[in-house]
Image (cartoon, rainbow, N blue to C red):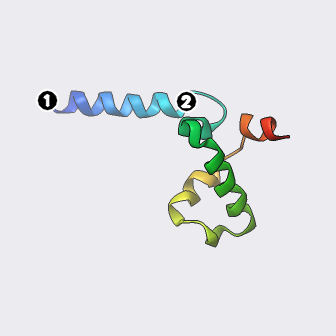
């Protein structure tokens, strides 16, 4: 049963990271600008970015990053 305990700890860490703030790109730290650029590219042509980003951008709503550049 002890192998399940570390798994639960890892799951809660991921949950904590996902719920930190309104801007999911903030989890990328200093690379937040890159996420914003890839998102702009995704909006123009989703096929131009790696499919790995599609799920992330499907419900992505830029928050502080978009407000800071305006």
Quarter-of-image position of residue 62: top right
Quarter-of-image position of residue 54: bottom right
The residue closer to the viewer here, 61 or 26, is 26
The residue closer to the viewer here, 44 or 34, is 34
The residue closer to the viewer here, 57 or 28, is 28
Question: How far across and how far down the image is residue 41, in percent?
Answer: 70, 62
Q: How many neighbours does mark 1 have within 10 angstroms: few (below 14), some (14-19), or many (20 or more)?
A: few
Q: Is residue 48 visible?
A: yes
Task: Check the picture and name the quadrant holding the C terminus.
Answer: top right
Number of the front mark, 2 or 1: 2
Which circle's residue, 2 or 1, is located before the other in the chain? 1
Question: How far across and how far down the image is residue 4, in percent?
Answer: 21, 32
Residue farthest to the left, as pictured: 1
Look at the picture and state if 53 lies above or below 29: below
Q: How many neighbours does mark 2 have within 10 angstroms: few (below 14), some (14-19), or many (20 or more)?
A: few
Residue farthest to the right, as pictured: 70
Query: Which SS class for mark 1?
Result: loop
How far apart, in angstroms, are the residues tagged by discs 2 and 1? 28 Å
For the point 73% across and 34% down, the residue is 64
Write down the residue under mark 2. 19
Quarter-of-image position of residue 58: bottom right
For the point 62% across and 72% down, the residue is 47
Question: How far across and how far down the image is residue 18, in percent?
Answer: 52, 34
Write down the residue under mark 1. 1
Q: Is 10 placed left or right of 65 in the picture?
A: left
Task: Check the picture and name the quadrant holding the N terminus.
Answer: top left
Q: Is 9 placed left or right of 52 in the picture?
A: left
């Amino acid at each position: 049963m002890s192998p399940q305990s570390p798994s639960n700890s890892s799951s809660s860490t991921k949950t904590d990271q996902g719920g930190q703030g309104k801007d999911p790109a903030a989890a990328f730290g200093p690379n937040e600008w890159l996420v914003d650029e890839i998102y702009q590219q995704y909006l123009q042509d989703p096929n131009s970015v790696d499919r790995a980003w599609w799920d992330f951008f499907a419900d992505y709503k830029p928050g502080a990053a978009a407000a800071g550049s305006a």
